Amino acid sequence: MAEQLALVIGGILGGLLLLLLTGVSCCLWRRFCATFTYEELPETPATAISAASSRQGDKRCQLHSRTQLSRPSGVPFMVPPSFQGRDWVPLHNKELSRAPQDPCLAPELLPHTSSGNLGDAGVVGTINPELYKFPEDTSETHFPDGCLGRLWFSVEYQQETEQLLVGLIKARLLQAPSETCSLLVKLHLLPDERRFLQSKTKCKTSSPQFDEHFIFQVSCKSVTQRVLKFSVYHVNRQRKHQLLGQVLFPLKNETLAGDCHHVFWRDLEAESLEPPSEFGDLQFCLSYNDYLNRLTVVVLRAKGLQLQEDRSVVSVFVKVSLMNQNKFVKSKKTSAVLGSVNPVYNETFSFKADATELDTASLSLTVLQSTEGDRSHPLGRVVVGPYMYTRGRELEHWDEMLSKPKELVKRWHALCGPTEP
């Protein structure tokens, strides 16, 4: 009796479990069918193109030429403003469509636009020429007033062979005494002024094209302490050389970076005919930016320095100090140049100075020679500033800087003795 009762209860439970599984299966099947159920829309141009793309080229052309497609009235369509005024042909329901240029054009080459943003449609594949414009080279068209000429050259240093490769490219608008002039260029690697390399003579032109290459043998340790000097000469009928101008180009690390040659151009400068002063001369530029309140000093070069030959190390640098009411504010110094009485620097320094402080501020530039250890020996000094501190050319330089804001004003100044004020 107990066994029969157990069988009945088991059968009832099994039937309930079967009914539960059946119901769950039905629910899952309905959801599965609902996921893949869609309503087939009438044929549109997009579906026609996609269907035609799977056929061969000849059949595609025939189908396109014979079949006339229409858009259902329930789907809105508008012509973007950028497409108005083009060749359009009328279709059904007052719609417009652009006339196809080539009915056999491959569908993968046709422009694709999203159906949800027809108003932003644009021409696909157009080229914006502004993106491919190179910056205009004004080096041969813009020359400052009083320019003596311009020289183009290239510089490359090969560390493996320790060779400095210099390319003399061209010169433009040289101020020669006559149109039938003969021009040549001499190249020095300062501080060695005895040895030089010379270009070929170019006749009857004031804008010669050289395209010549020269090699200087110089070690890696001293190459950054050397200065390239280009001297442009006119050769007259008596074979005498008349200097037209020169270019001094310091060899810095940034100019020798990389394994490729770098092309530069520089304007020629006239050689100073004035004899050097007792303690030497220093050339630098001054500029003041009244918008940024920045005082800029560009230390260019010095000449005729009286070096202390008994020193074991001969290297010269310039210390630039900003003073206010004879009180020290800030100082900066150039890199040291080895063994030259005519060092070239071309280094720029900037100081923060308000316009209200310029009447009490001054700049002190001191030329020093390095000695053993961290010591240095002063060779000469020059101070530029307002009437409170300076007179003569130093005052004129300061006043000209203030009268020409944001312009570099360049001048030579005689150095005073290290013990003079």
Image: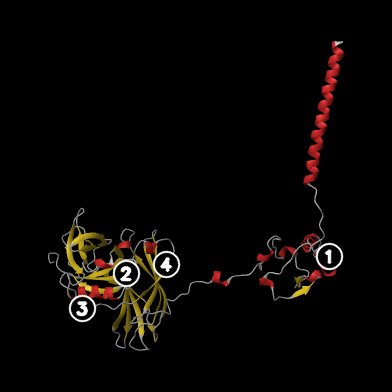
Q: Mark 3 highlights which residue?
A: 274
Q: Does label 1 or label 2 sit earlier along the sequence?
A: 1
Observer-side mark, 3 or 4, equals 3
Q: Nearer the viewer, mark 1 or mark 2?
A: 2
Residue placed under numbered mark 2 in the picture? 290
Is disc 3 placed on a helix, strand or loop? loop
Nearer mark to the viewer, of 1 and 4? 1
Type of amino acid at the residue the image marks with label 3:
Glu
Q: Secondary structure at mark 4?
A: strand
Dot 2: within a 10 Å radius of its alpha carbon, few (fewer than 14), some, or many (20 or more) residues?
some
Question: In this rendering, does residue 31 appear at all?
Answer: yes
Mark 4 crowd level (few <14, some 14–19, many ≥20, 10 Å Cα)? some
* Residue furthest front in the image: 74
- Give the residue at x 27% y 73%: 402
Front tag of 1 and 3: 1
Question: How much space separates mark 1 and mark 4, taking CA atoms?
Answer: 60 Å
**Pointer 1 local density, CA inside 10 Å: few below 14, some 14–19, many at least 20:** some
| Residue 346 showing in the rendered view | no
Q: CA distance from mark 1 to mark 2?
A: 76 Å
The residue under label 4 is 262
Residue 379 x, y percent position in the rendering: 17, 64
Q: CA distance from mark 2 to mark 3?
A: 34 Å
Secondary structure beneath label 2: loop
- Give the mark nearer the N terminus: 3 vs 4: 4
Q: Nearer the viewer, residue 291 or 102?
A: 291
Residue 401 horizontal side relative to residue 310, left or right: right
First in sequence: mark 1 or mark 3? 1
Q: Residue at x 32, y 69 (%)?
A: 290
> Would you name the residue on which mark 1 appears?
59
